């Protein structure tokens, strides 16, 4: 299976997703600042993948400063955490991983043991993510009794996680079970995660798919060619409102109009229980040049102004269910979100 990150024991190798599918190029990082730059510049992207990368970033800081006076380490880790947290604003998994690493550091009484403890914690975060995704795949696939044609947006596969994928993990599982007819892959303008990355992953796995432009989704729904939409998430509020790649909200509205189920697949680490509704989710604003230019080449008249919010928020009323590793939240709202998140973890 594809992997976006490889931990060597003292450095993190990052598959440069900006260059896929045409080139397979790996970069190697040895500190948190390098990892933060890899996240900021989209070499690694996808909420769970950037969380795992950040965890390794902190582990490398502990390794790098292993010889320093023990009392300096908390300060070093604090500064590294700040740099990592500032790399991208929307996916809350990043904060979740940084806080989990900070907790592991705080619980370690011996500064000399800190590098080892933090490396082990980062490895656990990555390994658990794959297990969580497999569980999401099982629970998600169980929602479909007969072979389906599903539509997906952005890239939520092995490349966006530590492995296997969330919404694309459900797709993978459906395919394994013989319950998938075909995937309609939104190209996902303006960053082309669907065209470049999802099509690449599905081709590598031999999963039948067809690429469509984002604006074709309604047409295929109207013709009865979409049985369900499956997407991932970057942050989910307490009431079940979902922030995900720009264009997701439009799909949810289209689904409601056509009576098509709209499913979100996301690990528990994507929930931000500190915020009540999606209104409070920070939306990353990216460079408008990513809209006006394609592969560095301008497609607009010179001087055209463009907007580039990288995510949007889908209100929980439009979500049929959120598939998590702890269970499926049908018709998400504050009570159902709370109940499933409180359930026992069976991964
Ligand atoms: O800007 P990106 O490519 O990091 O956005 C990714 C998404 O929106 C994904 O749907 C989300 O992170 C879930 S990935 C399992």
Image (spheres, rainbow, N blue to C red):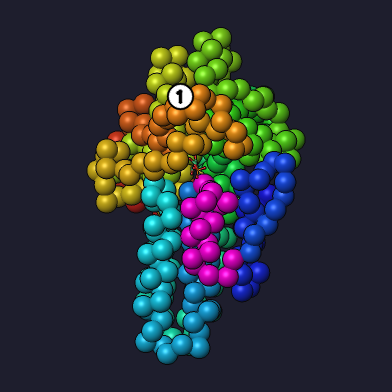
Image: 93 above or below 136:
below
**Does mark 1's beta carbon lie closer than 8 Å to ligand 1?**
no
- Please tell me how crowded label 1 is: few (under 14), some (14-19), or many (20+) other residues with Cα within 10 Å: many
Residue closer to the observer: 12 or 243: 12
Residue closer to the observer: 60 or 340: 60
Left or right of residue 165: residue 264: left
Residue closer to the observer: 233 or 145: 233
Q: Residue at x 45, y 14 (%)?
A: 258
Image: 126 above or below 80:
above
Q: Residue at x 61, y 45 (%)?
A: 18
> Picture coordinates of residue 211 (x, y %)?
64, 25
Badge 1 is on which residue?
A: 251
> Picture coordinates of residue 339 (x, y %)?
32, 45
Left or right of residue 166: residue 77: left
Image: 250 above or below 324:
above
Residue 12: image quadrant is: bottom right
> Picture coordinates of residue 123 (x, y %)?
56, 66
Please report the bounds of the magenta region as a residue range.
Answer: 29-46
Q: Residue at x 71, y 28 (%)?
A: 208
Q: Please check the rendered image and state whether residue 151 is part of the magenta-colored stretch, yes or no.
A: no
Please, which residue is most extreme toward the left here?
A: 276
Left or right of residue 273: residue 231: right
Q: Residue at x 63, y 51 (%)?
A: 16
């Amino acid at each position: 299976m594809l992997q976006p990150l490889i931990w060597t024991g003292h450095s993190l190798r990052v598959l440069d997703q900006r260059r896929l599918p045409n080139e397979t190029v790996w970069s190697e990082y040895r500190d948190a600042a390098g990892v933060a730059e890899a996240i900021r510049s989209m070499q690694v992207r996808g909420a769970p993948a950037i969380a795992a990368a950040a965890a390794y970033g902190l582990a490398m800081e502990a390794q790098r400063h292993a010889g320093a006076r023990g009392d300096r380490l908390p300060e070093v880790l604090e500064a590294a955490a700040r740099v990592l947290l500032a790399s991208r604003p929307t996916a809350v998994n990043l904060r979740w991983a940084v806080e989990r690493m900070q907790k592991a550091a705080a619980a370690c009484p011996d500064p000399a043991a800190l590098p080892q403890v933090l490396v082990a914690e980062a490895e656990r975060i990555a390994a658990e993510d794959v297990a969580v995704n497999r569980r999401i795949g099982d629970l998600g696939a169980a929602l479909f009794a007969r072979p389906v044609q599903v539509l997906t947006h952005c890239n939520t596969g092995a490349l966006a996680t530590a492995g296997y994928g969330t919404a694309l993990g459900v797709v993978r599982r459906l395919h394994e079970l013989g319950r998938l007819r075909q995937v309609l892959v939104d190209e996902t303008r303006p960053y082309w995660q669907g065209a470049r990355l999802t099509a690449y992953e599905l081709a590598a796995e031999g999963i039948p798919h067809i690429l469509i432009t984002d604006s074709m989704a309604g047409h295929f729904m109207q013709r009865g060619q979409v049985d369900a939409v499956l997407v991932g998430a970057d942050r989910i509020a307490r009431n079940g409102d979902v922030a995900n790649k720009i264009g997701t909200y439009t799909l949810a509205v289209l689904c409601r109009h056509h009576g098509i189920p709209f499913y979100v697949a996301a690990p528990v680490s994507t929930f931000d229980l500190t915020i009540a509704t999606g209104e409070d989710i920070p939306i990353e604003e990216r460079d408008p040049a990513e809209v006006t230019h394609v592969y560095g080449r301008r497609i607009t008249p010179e001087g055209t102004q463009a907007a580039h919010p990288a995510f949007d928020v889908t209100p929980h009323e439009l979500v049929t269910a959120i598939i998590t590793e702890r269970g499926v939240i049908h018709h998400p709202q504050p009570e159902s979100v709370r109940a499933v998140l409180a359930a026992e973890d069976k991964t």
